[in-house]
């Protein structure tokens, strides 16, 4: 599998690293596994950082897109920060943005993306506190 999933900042920011040739089965498994994690999460939103800087290519299968779109539509899915964007990734992200309202932002480094996601978590926590 050419996908590595860890926490950038548990339990709020998940880090996904893609490397080499990523096939559609890897993407399906990644989405299923993260869907289970999102469903079990006690967090209102979990944000993701996707590092594609070491990915050389991705195989696509348009027939499997409905299952992928369903997996990405989880209500606990927060923002997705993408590092190492390629024209092909840009194409797929735009499809996902339009199809399921994916919230994403491009970043030059994993550290920048993680800091942005942590700032979103801090803002959400501050807004959930009652005014004094």
Image (cartoon, rainbow, N blue to C red):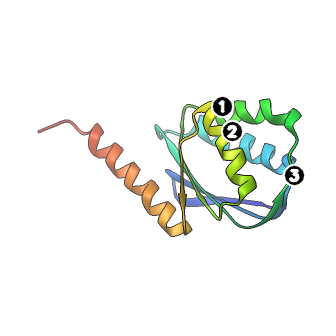
Q: Earlier in the sequence, mark 3 or mark 2?
A: 3
Give percent across and percent down for residue 15. Answer: 61, 59
Give the SS element for disc 2: helix
Residue under numbered circle 3: 59
> Is the residue under label 1 in contact with that under label 2 (CB below 8 Å)?
yes
- Look at the numbered discs 3 and 2 and tell me whether their residues touch, using CB distance below 8 Å: no
Name the image quarter holding residue 77: top right
What residue would you read off at disc 1? 99
126 to the left or right of 88: left
* Image point (80%, 43%), residue name: 28
- What is the secondary structure assignment of the residue under circle 1? helix
Q: Name the residue beneath numbered marker 2.
A: 95
At 83% across and 61% down in the image, what residue appears? Answer: 57
Residue at the (66%, 38%) spot, across then down: 96
Residue 110 is drawn in which quadrant? bottom right
The C terminus sits in image quarter: top left
């Amino acid at each position: 599998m050419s996908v590595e999933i860890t926490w950038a900042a548990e339990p709020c920011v998940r880090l996904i690293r893609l490397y080499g040739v990523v096939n559609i089965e890897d993407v399906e498994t990644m989405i299923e596994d993260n869907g289970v994690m999102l469903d079990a999460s006690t967090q209102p939103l979990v944000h993701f950082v996707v590092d594609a800087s070491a990915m050389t290519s991705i195989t696509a299968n348009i027939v499997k897109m409905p299952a992928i779109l369903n997996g990405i539509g989880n209500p606990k899915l927060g923002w997705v920060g993408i590092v190492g964007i390629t024209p092909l990734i840009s194409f797929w992200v735009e499809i996902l943005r339009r199809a399921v309202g994916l919230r994403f932002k491009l970043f030059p480094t994993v550290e920048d993306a993680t800091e942005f996601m942590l700032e979103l978590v801090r803002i959400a926590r501050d807004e959930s506190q009652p005014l004094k």
